[in-house]
């Protein structure tokens, strides 16, 4: 029947936009954003579900638990790494250093991922490719198989520890000035220790507190690791 001209016309119901389907990529994207903005401790399945306007149960259809989410975050960092390839026996030591620098760079761009990586065995595809790359470089250096296997654990552990320490300082919102004031105080404290009980700590107060603001300490670490592995290659 034709509607009367004086009868008000019912407004059309608004059409809701289609909800973007939930998948692993969206979950990891959201977890990464929360981690970078609020720190690793803010990342939980409940928090990610809230950010995605859904319930935690919806997440479990794609990610089994927080442990698997950590693995996915680590794998996302590995995807961002541009590692040297192919392994070059003539340059293996420099390639190893380049790989460690690249690992730290990727972790720095994703603050908090180092905490997700600590204590975890990297099993994602991208993380396994990183392991495969390191294995290839170490094998190209002529290291014994057992040394290769242990080194591929030692190297990420060192890089992750450096990144994690930086994350702690970032969480405390340390400015360069804060760090310098802390080091000045630490230097003064070491220098004031009883010389009869801590002679070397007192004498080395300057070197013990040097290089905290840049990458000098990190570069020292990768030089020591590479030199030590090279000595094992010579014995093989």
Image (cartoon, rainbow, N blue to C red):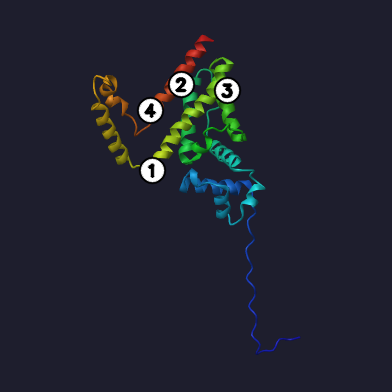
Q: Report if residue 87 is visible in the image.
A: no
Q: Say which residue label 4 marks.
A: 217
Q: Is residue 162 left or right of residue 192?
A: right
Mark 1 vs 3, N-terminal side: 3
Q: Which residue is mark 2?
A: 225
The answer to whether residue 206 is left or right of residue 163 is left
Number of other residues with Cα within 10 Å of mark 1, as a class: few under 14, some 14 to 19, many 20 or more? few
Q: Position of residue 152 (x, y in %)?
A: 54, 24
- The residue labelled by disc 1 is 172
Q: Identify the mark nearer the N-term, 2 or 3.
A: 3
Quarter of the figure that contains the C terminus:
top right
Residue at 53% x, 30% y: name it: 83
Say whether disc 1 or disc 2 marks the residue closer to the N-terminus. Answer: 1
Q: Which mark is residue 151?
A: none
First in sequence: mark 1 vs mark 4: 1
**Which of the two discs, 1 and 3, sits closer to the camera?**
1
Which residue position holds label 3? 136
- Report the residue at 50% width, 39% height from top: 113
Q: Nearer the viewer, mark 3 or mark 4?
A: 4
In this rendering, the answer to whether 8 lies above or below 213 is below
Q: CA distance from mark 4 to mark 2?
A: 12 Å
What is the distance, in whole Å, between disc 1 and disc 2 at their CAs? 30 Å
Task: Name, please, the residue furthest toward the right.
Answer: 1
Q: CA distance from mark 1 to mark 3?
A: 38 Å
Tell me where residue 190 appears, x and y as whole percent. 27, 27
């Amino acid at each position: 029947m034709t509607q009367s001209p004086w009868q008000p016309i019912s407004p059309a119901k608004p059409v809701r936009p289609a909800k973007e389907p939930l998948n692993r990529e969206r979950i990891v994207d959201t977890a990464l954003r929360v981690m970078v903005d609020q720190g690793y401790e803010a990342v939980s399945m409940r928090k990610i579900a809230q950010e995605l306007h859904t319930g935690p149960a919806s997440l479990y259809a794609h990610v089994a638990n927080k442990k698997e989410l950590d693995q996915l975050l680590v794998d996302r960092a590995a995807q961002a790494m541009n590692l040297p390839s192919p392994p070059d026996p003539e340059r293996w030591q420099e390639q190893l250093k380049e790989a460690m620098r690249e690992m730290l760079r990727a972790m720095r761009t994703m603050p908090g991922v180092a905490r997700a990586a600590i204590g975890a065995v990297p099993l994602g595809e991208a993380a396994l490719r990183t392991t495969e790359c390191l294995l290839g470089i170490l094998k190209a250096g002529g290291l014994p198989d057992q040394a290769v296997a242990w080194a591929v654990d030692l190297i990420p552990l060192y890089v992750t520890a450096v990144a994690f320490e930086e994350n702690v300082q970032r969480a405390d919102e340390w400015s360069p000035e804060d760090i310098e004031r802390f080091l000045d105080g630490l230097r003064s404290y070491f220098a004031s220790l009883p010389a009869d009980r801590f002679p070397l700590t007192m004498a080395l107060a300057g070197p013990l507190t040097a290089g905290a603001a840049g990458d000098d300490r990190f570069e020292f670490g990768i030089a020591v690791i590479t030199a030590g592995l090279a000595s094992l290659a010579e014995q093989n």
